[in-house]
Amino acid sequence: MAKESSSSIPCTPFLKDELDIVIPTIRNLDFLEMWRPFFQPYHLIIVQDGDPSKTINVPEGFDYELYNRNDINRILGPKAACISFKDSACRCFGYMVSKKKYIYTIDDDCFVAKDPTGKEINALEQHIKNLLTPATPHFFNTLYDPFRDGADFVRGYPFSLREGAQTAVSHGLWLNIPDYDAPTQLVKPRERNTRYVDAVLTIPKGTLFPMCGMNLAFDRELIGPAMYFGLMGDGQPIGRYDDMWAGWCTKVICDHLGLGIKTGLPYIWHSKASNPFVNLKKEYKGIFWQEELIPFFQSAVLSKECTTVQKCYIELSKQVREKLGKIDPYFTKLADAMVTWIEAWDDLNPPKGAAEVPNGPAKGK
Amino acid sequence: MSLKIEDNEVDIVIAALRPNLNTFLEAWRTFFSNFHLIIVKDPNLEEDLQIPPGFDHQVYTKSDMDRVLNGASINFSGHSCRYFGYLISRKKYIISVDDDCLPARDNSGVIVDAVTQHISNLQTPATPFFFNTLYDPYRQGADFVRGYPFSLRDGVECLLSCGLWLNIADYDAPTQIVKPSERNTRYVDAVMTVPLRAMMPLSGINIGFNREVLGPALVPGLRLVGEGKRRWETIEDIWSGMCAKVVCDHLGYGVKSGLPYVWRGVGSDTDNPMDSLKKEWEGVKLMEEIVPFFQSVKLPKTAVTAADCVIEISRMARENLASLNPVYAQAADTMEAWVNLWKVAGSDRL
């Protein structure tokens, strides 16, 4: 792979025509200026949340398509009910309309970080490396990602497992404002993540993790339909659990289908600490509910007949309805929305050769 | 729920495979000076050990092993001699480092106190039930991330701390042959819990553990037929590590991996790995059977101590693996003998 020059402008933008960058926003996209050297070669899908009559200014020179709530309603019709409003969970609409193999999603308060040598981190390039090299979910490698330069499988790692599994998700991390929940934010308002951990590792099969959507890449063809970010925000009893929900579903499905999920590098610089009191209100129910959700996901078993992501997801939605519906009617609604999501996904992503979908996207240049 | 481990609760066990321990011990002096050292001489080593003055230490040799073994068939030669140290210790915690490893430097150039780091890993809880993406939440400047269930934030006691190595990484012989000049230069500033049911290869080069609870599970069970002195000619630690992990998973304890690093290089496996390939290949083949075996081990509720668990595992090994290769039957025998010996060693001064 090409080595970067000191100005950190990439020589070769990898997967330029195979990757979309999905950005949810409600305010502005000024942050893109800092990312310009890294993002400009790529196509952006901007999902504008909140008031559709507001104009979001996209910096000059980016190739993008932008969707506001009116577009979402127009494209999905009644199925638009599964896409959250007034919450960054709406980003998953971007996954659905994309036609590319890979997605990178980033929040609009995330900037380019520097590694310990002071060099700017090309987060997108690292995500691509993570996705294009195998994951190792079946056996823990103590030297972390064996496919990185300068690393390998350690003594005792069975050779038959060294091919690894396809990487479906690359979960990046954040320096500066860490992704804490509201109670932790309240207790530690000044804590900043300053530790650069120079590792990528695979999350073992059978282990769940809290997936953060701030700096996330995935293979849309391998796992896209599982990346539904749930019902959050306006009219919903919960917020800030969108990426968590998608992460738990995705991990269960990846484990079932033999795909891998990596976490670690790359880091981005997270600049904005959201208001912990506002967060507490949003998360409150989630904090209690997750005590039931975790055992649910830990024990979720998908049948052998679930050979595609969509089938896995529909099966999961049935289990959500059955087992979680009794916690709160929200979960019955969510189970419905999960089904709607898959229907909408399949509408917008018919098998190759099928008819074009009407009401195409609003493109912008 | 963090513990406080006192220096006098820890023994440092050194397996002396080479006679001259001067360089090694001088390099570690600052970090070892507060602790009692158990130095176990490889029974096959002829020459006397050279140990610099000023260390609180005890040397154990073949004659001690013979006395304690009293006829039991456990082979403590080569790298396995350290297990004798684990057995003979009377302390709650053990830290063990190979005699070809020196203190490493971190990314700021500061010398790493591996002993203190192992102790810190054992003092703070492990979190095996849910992966924390910011790694060890108990480290300064870190915490549990959003989405980590609150009921799991107490964690469980960490019984085993697996450290890493800079410079000569712990690779097997085939990998060494393919990458003879590769050196591990990446200092990953993290400790993390190895999740429940995830299996990993334990490298015995740099570890710390709770001897009181886990001791019987760190068993010198599996000897390769052609086991040698070089690390890649052994898998005794891999086998005992799998036992230890299965035991921890079953009993509800944790295993951590990551910091501390040691610098591996002095007299390490820098000889031609080609010679070892014949011996190592046996180990490489065995791993194909060993891993599925341990992944399938289910221990009964009645196994409530590490010793109970090891007996069960030895029984299962005999049942499921012995027919594949005689080394497994031998391992099963050794594991039983080890547990019996541990019962005696644990209760009485020998």
Image (cartoon, coloured by chain):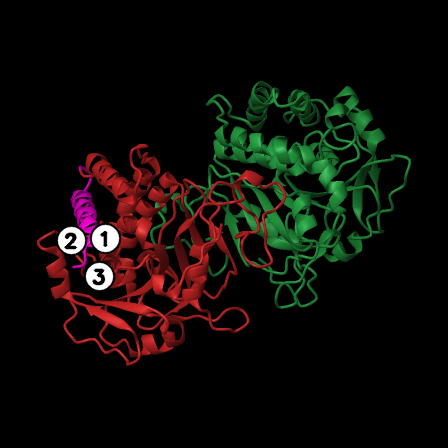
Other residues around mark 1 within 10 Å, as few (<14) / some (14–19) / many (≥20): many
Q: Name the disc covering residue B81, or none.
A: 3
Instruction: Name which of mark 2 and mark 3 comes first in the sequence.
Output: 2
Instruction: Name which of mark 2 and mark 1 comes first in the sequence.
Output: 2
Which quadrant, please, contains the C terminus of chain B? bottom left
Mark 1 belongs to which subunit?
B
Check disc 2 and report the residue beneath it. Answer: B74
Q: Where is residue A288 in the image (x, y as percent from the top left)?
A: 62, 33
Q: Chain A is drawn in which colour?
A: green
Other residues around mark 3 within 10 Å, as few (<14) / some (14–19) / many (≥20): many
Q: Position of residue B99 (x, y in %)?
A: 30, 69
Q: Give the range drawn in magenta.
A: B323-350
Spot the residue most to the left. Answer: B71
Judge whether residue B349 is colored magenta. Answer: yes
Query: Given the image, on which type of amino acid does mark 2 rest?
Result: Ile
Q: Name the disc covering residue B120, or none.
A: none
Check disc 1 and report the residue beneath it. Answer: B220
Which chain is displayed in red in the rendered image?
A: B
Give the alpha-carbon distance from disc 2 to disc 1, as whole Å.
Answer: 8 Å
Query: Given the image, on which type of amino acid does mark 3 rest?
Result: Cys
Mark 3 belongs to which subunit?
B
A141 to A91, vertically: above or below: below
Classify mark 3: helix, strand or loop: helix
Query: Given the image, on which type of amino acid does mark 1 rest?
Result: Pro
Given residues A25 and A96, the one toward you in this image is A25
Same chain check for tags 2 and 1 = yes
Classify mark 1: helix, strand or loop: loop
Judge whether residue B39 is colored magenta. Answer: no
- Labelled pair 2, 1 in contact (Cβ < 8 Å): yes
